[in-house]
Amino acid sequence: MMHNVLITGGSGYLGGTLLARLPAANLSLNIFALVRNDSQAEAVKQYRATPITFDISDASAVRDAVVNNRITVVYYLVDAINSDAQVSFIKALAEVEEATGQDVHFLHTTGAKMFSSHTGMPNDRPLLDTDPSLYDLAKSRLGSIKPLVLNQAVKTNCTVIDEGDKYGVRTYILVPCIVYGKGEGFGNTISIQTVDIVKAAKAVGKVHKVDDGSPSWPVCHVIDNTNLYINLLRNILSGSGPGYGKNGYYLASSGSVVWNDLYSAMAVGLAKRNVIQDSTVSTRADAVTIEKMAVALGVPPEFVPVQVGGNCTFTAENGKKLGWKPQFESGHILEAADEEVEWILKHRK
Ligand SMILES: NC(=O)c1ccc[n+]([C@@H]2O[C@H](COP(=O)([O-])OP(=O)(O)OC[C@H]3O[C@@H](n4cnc5c(N)ncnc54)[C@H](OP(=O)(O)O)[C@@H]3O)[C@@H](O)[C@H]2O)c1
């Protein structure tokens, strides 16, 4: 049966690359794209997507958009923190299932921070995305996570799963990590963490560590990240029954990178282009430097290490069960750091 798939965040880095690559996946589906203005509406048509505009904070608008267009799959790539819109989508999908008898699916996008030292998740051993205790681990952390915004984001992941269970909607928690590489969409084509390393370095004239020791973080090329999103959809549409709910965590990552190695590789690219004078990476930033980095990143000082540091041992296993295999090994990010710096400097607003 034909599925109607809604992509949100299609003008963004991850959603844009997904929208650009989905037509070539040869799946039996109609693509709808949430847009917020006329130029976005025009742009998504090149991917054979039907543009629709509605306010995701308005539950009845979400309901109408999903039910009237008989949407059965929603890719949510807009906001990892709050949960109100996700709940509206899940309720609306349940109505479509009721009316059509078709399975309905909600694919929420969170981030690796929610499975890291920043949220107090285990990070002294590999934490597999197939670990059956992930939901309980996350739930047990609620109330003790600082900064509060991460507490909210962890809660949102649990809420998506709980609401999916309640309304009979299959939910999946997709977990991008440090994603890098040229975005292929029509809108934003640069990522988050690598961009923040550039912004912070520009502000203080050097790349600084924000942690002691050698913490590491999972990485993924944007094409591999996108392929996991598509592979999951392929498995959903074929009826192979990919894990969902408490068994539906999917990290997109080919392995980890030590932050210090990433800082060094990017510092070389920045110094080469005279953005900073010195390609050596400084020891852990002091309070004054962190203040300046925070201003550049537009976050409170205590959030700087959250943006560009921390330890995360989350490990991708679930996607492999779907036949997903990353093309780019984790070390590729270091080889590609020079190109990443170039791309960021060219496209940063
Ligand atoms: N990139 C990464 O490395 C990474 C890693 C982990 C997690 N994530 C998470 O993945 C999600 C997507 O990331 P991204 O890098 O693709 O971000 P992005 O490039 O900033 O794109 C965000 C998208 O969300 C849309 N959007 C924002 N608020 C909206 C609203 N109220 N209604 C409708 N659309 C709205 C934006 O539309 P406009 O263009 O109209 O503003 C844009 O299309 C985010 O939640 C992010 O936190 C990303």
Image (cartoon, rainbow, N blue to C red):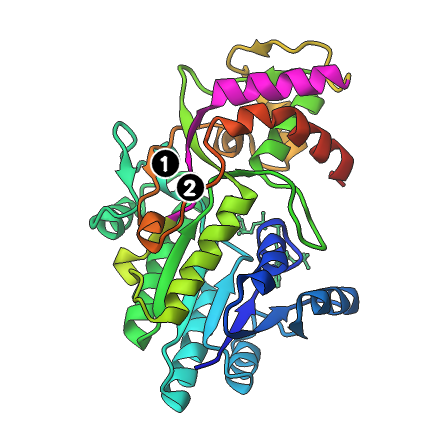
Q: Residue at x 26, y 58 (%)?
A: 246
Is the CB atom of the residue marked by disc 2 within 8 angstroms of ligand 1's nearest atom?
A: yes
Give me the residue at 58% from left, 22% from top. 290
Q: Read off the magenta span.
A: 251-273
Q: Is residue 202 above or below residue 168?
A: above
Q: Is residue 322 magenta?
A: no
| Dot 1: element | loop
Return the mark for residue 116.
Answer: 1
Q: What is the crowding at mark 1: few (fewer than 14 residues within 10 Å), some, or many (at least 20)?
A: many
Say which quadrant the C terminus sits in.
top right
Say whether residue 82 is visible: no
Question: For the residue labelled by badge 2, is the local secondary structure a helix, a strand or a loop?
Answer: helix
Identify which amino acid the numbered label 1 is placed on.
Answer: Ser
**Mark 1 near mark 2, Cβ–Cβ under 8 Å?**
yes
Q: Nearer the viewer, residue 289 or 12?
A: 12
Q: Tell me where residue 33 sits by quadrant.
A: bottom right
Q: Residues within 10 Å of mark 2 (few under 14, many from 20)?
A: many
Q: Which residue is mark 2?
A: 112
Q: Amino acid at mark 2?
A: Ala
Q: Is 6 displayed left or right of 111 in the figure?
A: right
What residue is at 50 percent from the left and 74 percent from the top?
28
Q: How far across and how far down the image is residue 338, in percent?
A: 66, 24
Locate residue 104, reporting x and y percent. 39, 75
Which one is nearer the viewer's eye here, 322 or 52?
322
* Mark 1 beta carbon near ligand 1 (under 8 Å): no
